[in-house]
Amino acid sequence: MKEIISTTKAPAAIGPYSQAVKLGNMIFTSGMLPIVPETGKFAEGDVQAQTRQVLSNLKVLLESAGSSLEKVVKTTVFIKDMNDFPRINDVYADFFASEQPARSCVEVARLPKDAQLEIEVIAYI
């Protein structure tokens, strides 16, 4: 049975979609932007600060669903500029230090709210 996952500790959806969906023992998140939940604004700073915010948001979202970053099996990273890839990787490696999930990373023309990056994950419980 499908269950909608929602928490105020992560940014609210900015459209007609859910923050995440739980199906059986799997969690599928929507793309997460670098929004600070308390302010509704982007995290200040460079792409590394924004990457840290995105991954922190995903962490609390997964935890609210009974999962964790350690249980992520797949990530998809959307970035505005492939030149930022090494800097994003540096922060990403801090959050996924061992048993890294599978990952796709693509450069896109534009992201919602003109974000520099967006990340979605699939995890288990």
Image (cartoon, grey):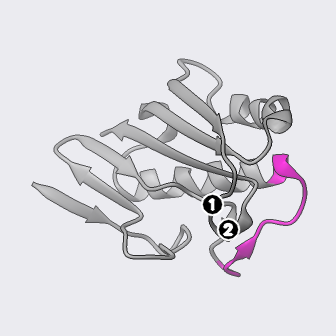
Question: From the image, which quarter does the C terminus lie in?
Answer: top left
Q: Is residue 46 above or below residue 7?
A: above
* Three-letter amino acid code at the position of disc 1: Leu
Q: Position of residue 100 (x, y in %)?
A: 55, 21
Task: Find the magenta span and give its range.
Answer: 38-49
Q: Which residue is mark 1?
A: 33
Foreground residue among 84 and 40: 84
Q: Quadrant of residue 24?
A: top left
Q: Residue at x 36, y 67 (%)?
A: 18
SS at mark 2? strand
Q: Position of residue 58 (x, y in %)?
A: 54, 52
Q: Name the residue furthest front.
A: 109
Q: Which residue is mark 2?
A: 35
Q: Residue at x 76, y 54 (%)?
A: 116
Label disc, if present, on residue 98 of the rendered structure = none
Find out whether the residues at labels 1 and 2 contact each other: C-beta distance under 8 Å: yes
Q: Residues within 10 Å of mark 1 (few under 14, many from 20)?
A: many
Q: Is residue 39 magenta?
A: yes
* Three-letter amino acid code at the position of disc 2: Ile
Q: Residue at x 54, y 27 (%)?
A: 103
Q: Residue at x 16, y 57 (%)?
A: 2
